[in-house]
Amino acid sequence: MADNGTATITLTLDGTNQSASLKLRAGTIGPSVADIRSLYNELGIFTFDPGYGGTAACESKITYIDGDAGVLLYRGYPIEQLAEHSTFLEVAHLLLNGELPNAAEKRLFEHGVLRHTMLHEQIRSFFNGFRRDAHPMAVLCGVVGAMSAFYHDSLDINDPEHRRISAFRLIAKVPTIAAWAFKYSIGQPFVYPRNDLGYAENLLYMMHAVPTEEYRVSPVLARALDLILILHADHEQNASTSTVRLAGSTGANPFACIAAGIASLWGPAHGGANEAVLKMLAEIGHAEQIPDFIRKVKDRNSSVRLMGFGHRVYKNYDPRAKIMQRTCHEVLGELGIKDDPLLDLAVELERVALHDEYFVSRKLYPNVDFYSGIILKAMGFPTSMFTALFAVARTVGWISQWKEMVEDPSQRIGRPRQLYTGAPRRDYLPLSARG
Ligand code: CMC
């Protein structure tokens, strides 16, 4: 890159005298990008990058990841510092507005979220339409999408005040929807949110309280859940965030966009991995079975993967996984669980994998989901709720990224192109002429 920050890449099409000059753009940190927007006009070719591994789909100021060094920054702040000193709502303010709040802003922001946790009462009836055994992610996806039918007064995406209110509504109400999805599945009455409780505290309360007795939320568990929410709040242009941006690029309302993000998060390669880790540990059952399981993972003919391991961007230890591992021990300590067979099995599985050439050579390390499931299980959450809790946290990242995109003057509808390898043009054959 030239000293003045300008540089170009010149591409020449072999065998022709056609060439294109692509401008290089430097970020604050991280790799520069080649601006390929003129490529089609100049050379008549597209770029090809299935899975977008080498493509920057947008410009963003929110989250930075250095996958080789294992670095994660929210608005420039290292995740380790935020995890140690901050709270989820403070991080939400940071992601959404770009700065940590001062004392007055913090009060105002917390008030905005914690006083809007109640759902429109008619939304209650939606839950009765689902089967009792519906997965909480199915319910979450449906009910969040349905929010667009209830909050008409904040759907104008071109009005900054509407965008602000929708963001508050989503951050405040998604925990209530998630908790009610759980209550519905176990046949218990819905527990209404309480304005005097903190964000994570309220979520624990709505999940675990029953009307027949007093429920006191453990401050240690509330802090642990708050920390888990911080670690999951945003993660650059991952699959679900890109889904939210793509849906939002059409001008769709924020509730519809977040519902699309929830659907994308559900898959086992993404947010569904924490649930899959526990299923995997249960299937392995005992440390003696680990070698056999690792053999299956390495077998090219099997589709078995070591869930909670590997990441598209991190080719080093996921910084969130390190914090998660520490928190796991703290939570089990608080709950008086001295020997947890699942944790012991996970630790041994991690040890074996980190010493195995297959995982070492492919730079496969534990990701955030490897330990989060064990903590959430110990806290009394059923496995089916794990991804829903991830969605609660990620709602903040999604809505921050959506807002950034809508406010970006260079934003256009997302419309990727393709390499077509199907049949060339051919003529319709009548049924009698088809072989
Ligand atoms: N177990 C076994 N082999 C693996 C794994 C794994 N978990 N992950 C990657 N590999 C192998 C893969 O088979 C391939 O090997 P080869 O080069 O011999 O064909 C190589 O590593 C590269 O894998 P890839 O599929 O090209 O990598 P990717 O960047 O497309 O996939 C991933 C990333 C996260 C989908 C994948 O690592 C995975 O499926 N992990 C398990 C699911 C998981 O834990 N997901 C949570 C991700 S973190 C939270 C989140 O994003 O929501």
Image (tube, grey):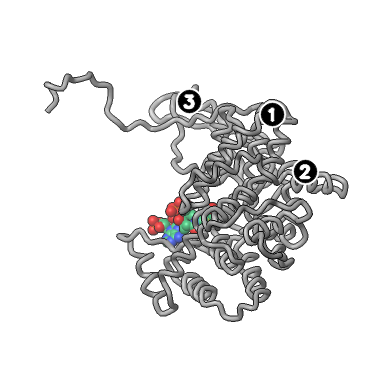
Which one is closest to the eye, mark 3 or mark 2?
A: 2
**Tag 3 near tag 1, CB within 8 Å:** no
First-in-chain label (3 vs 1): 3
Write the residue at 32% across / 61% down: 302
Q: Disc 3 and disc 1: Cα gap in Å?
A: 42 Å
Residue 99 position by quadrant:
top right
Q: Tell me if 373 is positioned left or right of 46 in this view.
A: right
User: Can you see residue 428?
Assistant: yes
Q: Disc 1 and disc 2: Cα gap in Å?
A: 16 Å
Mark 1: few/some/many CA within 10 Å (<14, 14-19, 20+): few
Q: Quadrant of the N terminus?
A: top right
First-in-chain label (1 vs 2): 2
**Amino acid type, label 1:** Asp
Residue 394 lies, with reference to residue 340, above or below; the image says: above
**Amino acid type, label 2:** Gly
Question: Which of 327 and 167 lies nearest the eye of the viewer?
Answer: 167
The residue singled out by tag 1 in the image is 153
Write the residue at 54% across / 54% down: 387
Residue 388 lies, with reference to residue 259, above or below; the image says: below
The residue singled out by tag 2 in the image is 112
> Residue 359: where, in percent of width, then height?
45, 65
User: Can you see residue 57?
Assistant: no
**Amino acid type, label 3:** Tyr
First-in-chain label (3 vs 2): 3
